[in-house]
Image: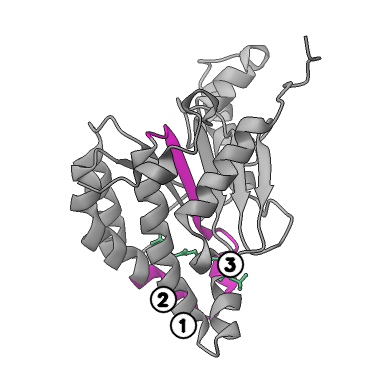
Amino acid sequence: MWESDGDLLARVDKNKMPRHVAIIMDGNGRWANGLGLLRNAGHLAGVKTLKNILKTAVNLKLEVLTVYAFSTENWKRPHSEVDFLMNLFSEYLEREKLEMHENNVRIKFLGRTEDFSPALQNLIHDSIELMKNNTGVIFNVAADYGGQDEIVRAAQKLAQRVANGELSPENISTQLFENELDTAGQPPVDLLIRTSGDLRVSNFLLWQVAYAEFWFTDTPWPSFTPEEFVSALVDFGKRTRRFGALNT
Ligand code: FPP
């Protein structure tokens, strides 16, 4: 089991915890370049950060943690970087899946994933199967994921049901639409964290962030710590959320 850092966790008011935290793990390349290293060294260091943040999420009993690992646009990067990332995902799953399972993590994947190698697809399938009955944190890895793509895929599934005569267009509701998203059945994002200074959403969880609170930091992902993660959660606890209504 992963050890818990009691002092750190005590900073978070359990009654003001987000249910779903999503993270854009940005800045691996810039972090590496700043140290005179190749970009891939940044991705390697980013895996360590991810492990630490997942561990903290487990110890905090967070309901859902979603991370942006590879976007539908990341295929445009040089082959060498794409290949490196694919190998990194495989190694990560191979190495970490049992430990995640022991910690009651339920891994899921958001996105297409069918363009990944058969070996990686098998690993993804096996990891999901291994952890599918776990009851702890839902750990969504967004891989070959784009928010627009997810919405189009959901629309296609509903359109097919209309074409089959199973559904009439006027019965399509936000709830029905949500049921077709990759995050079906999960709470919406409460807190979106982006590391490394850019202030944009980059096609991540476009539907699910409708009422999310945003938290940005200049820290590049490899330098992001559980302490800073907890600071984001503490800050979230101070926000007033109105969901479009007025304060009463
Ligand atoms: C963004 O940084 C990061 C990525 C596109 C890849 C994220 C991958 C990891 C953190 C590796 C671990 C993930 C798993 C699931 C094992 P960037 O390369 O765009 O950095 P830059 O903006 O500085 O160029």
User: Residue 80 — which label?
Assistant: 1
Bin the neighbour count of mark 3 within 10 Å (Cα to Cα): few under 14, some 14-19, many 20 and up. many
What is the magenta range?
61-87
- Choose top left, top right, bottom left or bottom right for residue 133: top left
Residue type at tag 1:
Ser
Residue type at tag 3:
Pro
- Residue at left offset 18%, top offset 44%: 102
**Mark 2 or mark 3, which is nearer to you?**
3
Badges 3 and 1: C-beta atoms under 8 Å apart?
no
Q: Position of 8 compared to 90: left or right? A: right
Give the mark, 2 or 3, whose residue is nearer the N terminus: 2
Q: Is residue 128 magenta?
A: no
Residue type at tag 2:
Asp
Looking at the image, can residue 148 be seen?
A: yes
Tell me where residue 174 appears, x and y as whole percent: 63, 20
Bin the neighbour count of mark 1 within 10 Å (Cα to Cα): few under 14, some 14-19, many 20 and up. few
Q: Which residue is mark 2?
A: 83
Tell me where residue 199 appears, x and y as whole percent: 74, 56
Badges 1 and 2: C-beta atoms under 8 Å apart?
yes
- Choose top left, top right, bottom left or bottom right for residue 189: top right
Colour pattern of the rendering: one colour
* Numbered disc 2: secondary structure: helix
- Residue at left offset 42%, top offset 40%: 9
Q: Is residue 81 magenta?
A: yes
Asked if ligand 1 lies within 8 A of label 3, the reply is yes
Q: Which residue is mark 3?
A: 220
Give the mark, 3 or 1, whose residue is nearer the N terminus: 1
Looking at the image, can residue 151 be seen?
A: no
Tell me where residue 54 appears, x and y as whole percent: 38, 49
- Residue at left offset 55%, top offset 90%: 36
* Numbered disc 1: secondary structure: helix
